[in-house]
Image (cartoon, rainbow, N blue to C red):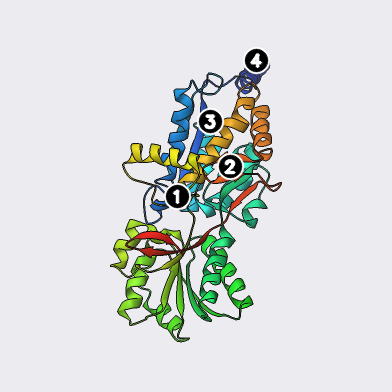
Amino acid sequence: MVTNKIHGIIVAFVLLTLIGCGSKPEVIKIGYIGPLSGPSAVLGMDAIQAIEIAANEVNAQGGINGLPIEIIAEDDQYIPAKTLTAYEKLVNVDGVEILLVSTYGGVFTIADRAQEDNVIVIDPLDCNNELAALPENVFCLATETESIGYALADYLLSQGKTRAGVMYSTKDNFMALVSDAFKRKFSQGGGFTKEENFVYTDVDFKTQLLKLNEIKPDAIVFLGHDETGIAMKQARDLGITAQFMATGTVTSPGLQQASHGAAEGTIFAYWEPAADNSLSKEFEAKFVSLVGRPPILPLTTHPAYDSMQVLIKNSLPQSVKRVDRTERVDAIRRGLYSTKRFEGTTGEITMDSDGAVRIKESAFRLENGRPVLI
């Protein structure tokens, strides 16, 4: 009798599982994980707005085959351990099958899990060879990491400068990659680089700055987030007159406030849409209407919006027809890989065979707190 009861329970559980696997969702859930607070918030706080705009647009038109899109966002403060916690919640509690993740180290933390769980992950902030080498469920549609270092090195060499100091954050491997790209390109042009690193929670950078100043650098490249504003101010307080260089995060209001004016005139790698891109203008008008200001970092918003558009137009229309979850995710994956010459706010989008769309950055100067193309 007990054996029969146990057998019955097992059969019931299997049937319930099969029914669950074969049920068609009533809403398309897309998760977002990124920094919405903390010193790296500039990388996520506008990206989620762009993602919401894309979802609201399609929902206003009746959704995809009648199914609305629901965006569920989690703040990981750009800390990979928190990315994993957010992943567990979104996938195992909310039942999300698609994730957009703006935390570089976090993508690597969850990549293998996402492949095992058959979850699609798209990085709309960073794109490089390391990301492209991750399992086939991981994609990137974003500015190319290496191009940041190349743009800075090319500018410095064009000015006839040959000595540079680099300070990079060890929060994850992203800034080290930028540093490596810079050093490689700079050395090819005859430049010499001295390098120091720091922990993102540091508030005293004088030791590293004094070591870099030993080579009498023509420029100091600051690779980090809002904390680098503190380092810039301390450099000027120490009497260091080298040209400052940085990533696009120098446009962050938090960084500029921390620098007390020292960030002004910084040369930095950046991306902005082409002036004649009508799709970009339409999107930015919607962004201003929603947020009350233009995007602080277009490289965080436009790729995020385009990632959603590629999903909405290339992947989701076929996936929502599938009852089986595995077939749905397979359809999403195929749709992403088949993206060719898709017109977006970032320009023409073609997915490479390694699951990457790489957008190049260029050199800008910070003038009155705003980027100006050099």
Instruction: Give how far apart the Cα atoms at labels 2 and 4 are.
Output: 38 Å
Q: Is residue 5 visible?
A: yes
Residue drawn at (42%, 51%) of the image: 77
How far across and down, in percent of the image, does residue 63 sit? 50, 23
**Mark 2 or mark 1, which has the lower sequence index?**
2
Please tell me which residue is depicted at 54% across the width and 35% down the height of the picture: 309
User: Which of the numbered marks, if any, corresponds to residue 121?
Assistant: 2
Q: Which residue is mark 3?
A: 95
Residue under numbered circle 1 = 298
Q: Which residue is mark 4?
A: 8
Callout 3, which amino acid? Gly
Classify mark 2: helix, strand or loop: strand
Q: Earlier in the sequence, mark 3 or mark 1?
A: 3
Residue type beneath disc 2: Val
Distance of label 4 from label 1 (alpha carbons): 57 Å
Q: Is residue 279 left or right of residue 317?
A: left
